[in-house]
Amino acid sequence: MKILGKFSASRMVLAASGIEHEELLSVAEPLLSDLPNIPRPQEPKSMYTGGDYRCQTDSGDQTHFALAFELPGGWHKEKEAIILNVLQILMGGGGSFSAGGPGKGMYSRLYVRILNEYPQVLSFSAFNSIYNHTGIFGIQATTGSDFAPTVIEVAVKELIAVATPGQVDQIQLDRAKQSTKSAILMNLESRVCKLFSYLIVDVFNYAGQGFISSSLAFLFTYEVFSADGCFRRYWETSLDIWKPVEYFLKAVDEITLKDISSVAQKLLSSPRTMALYGNVINVPSYDSVSRKFK
């Protein structure tokens, strides 16, 4: 009975393509009309705590680390979530062996200021993940263990720099905004994401809502190309506001230098998260890194 209780109308979604709506109803209604309509349980809010995790291994002399911060609100603070995506592209980064090419971020701050300057750094890039009620942003990197303290030091300096007014110029911001809009529009060409957008739009058009959801529209800024990834990211986000893709393109255009520094300052005021793997013996303590942000 416990298992049967999980199969309720509020927990299910029926999606199909290549079939007329009325025909789908004629097949689905006899099979699903007697499902119990149990209200969905209250979704627990994500709670960010910060902290330090270190895993020493014998797999070599490399150190992998991530230094991250919280942006409270997640998709419920839509403007800040959009700014966070632009900030991530503005900082950019990548691997030291990238061959370049369109979209590789070769002119992003972390590529120009770190990867081009420190041959000891194997990879160095900004990342972000946004959820319903919270989000995280940070820098992840890989380097030799002897150089790990220096890499963490430059990561701290780069994060402080984007939070300092005047350290990011308009050319850098404009390039990041154009790249963000390009990512949104280019991912509309993804067959998998396009399939899901058609299915969702069809559902909401039937309900009298002629727009795709904000969460799905901005999904395209993520480099998610698998069916599972698109589906999972879609259902993790909030579905209570419906807006067209053009809305987000306009929102990106309206981001200012002040917006970037303000969101970065908010990030750095949150508790730090440090996660390390590999040879972590030379990495500074959590408290010593935290003090650099005060």
Image: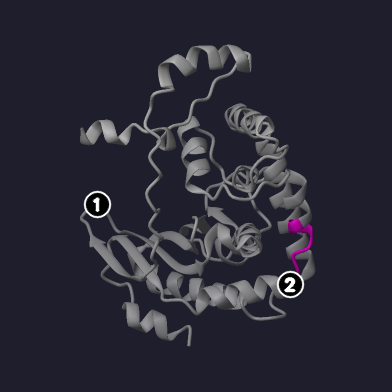
3D distance between C-alphas at marks 1 and 2: 43 Å
The mark closer to the camera, 1 or 2, is 2
Above or below for 34 versus 209: above
Is there any visible trace of residue 99 in the rendered image?
Answer: yes
The magenta segment: 251-257
- Crowd tier of the residue under label 1, counting other residues whose Cα lies within 10 Å: few below 14, some 14–19, many 20 or above: few
| Residue contact between numbered discs 1 and 2, judged by CB atoms under 8 Å | no
Q: Amino acid at mark 2?
A: Leu
Report if residue 120 is visible in the image. no
Q: Amino acid at mark 1?
A: Ser
Height in image: 161 above or below 8?
below
Asked whether 175 or 40 is in front, the reply is 40
Q: Residue at x 67, y 70 (%)?
A: 260
Picture coordinates of residue 118, whole percent (x, y): 52, 65
- Tell me the crowding category of disc 2: few under 14, some 14 to 19, or many 20 or more residues within 10 angstroms, Cα based: some
Q: Position of residue 219 (x, y in %)?
A: 59, 44
Total numbered labels: 2
Closest to the observer, 173 or 125: 173
Instruction: Say if 290 sits above or below 176 in the image.
Output: below
The image position of residue 120, as x and y in percent, is: 46, 62
The N terminus lies in quadrant? top left
Nearer to the camera, 99 or 198? 198
Q: Position of residue 37 (x, y in %)?
A: 40, 35
Element type where label 1 sits in the image:
loop
Element at badge 2? helix
Left or right placement of residue 27 versus residue 178 in this view: left
- State the residue position of label 1: 59
Indicate how the structure is coloured in the image: one colour
Which residue has dot 2 on it? 257
Q: Is residue 102 above or below residue 283?
A: above
Magenta span includes 199: no
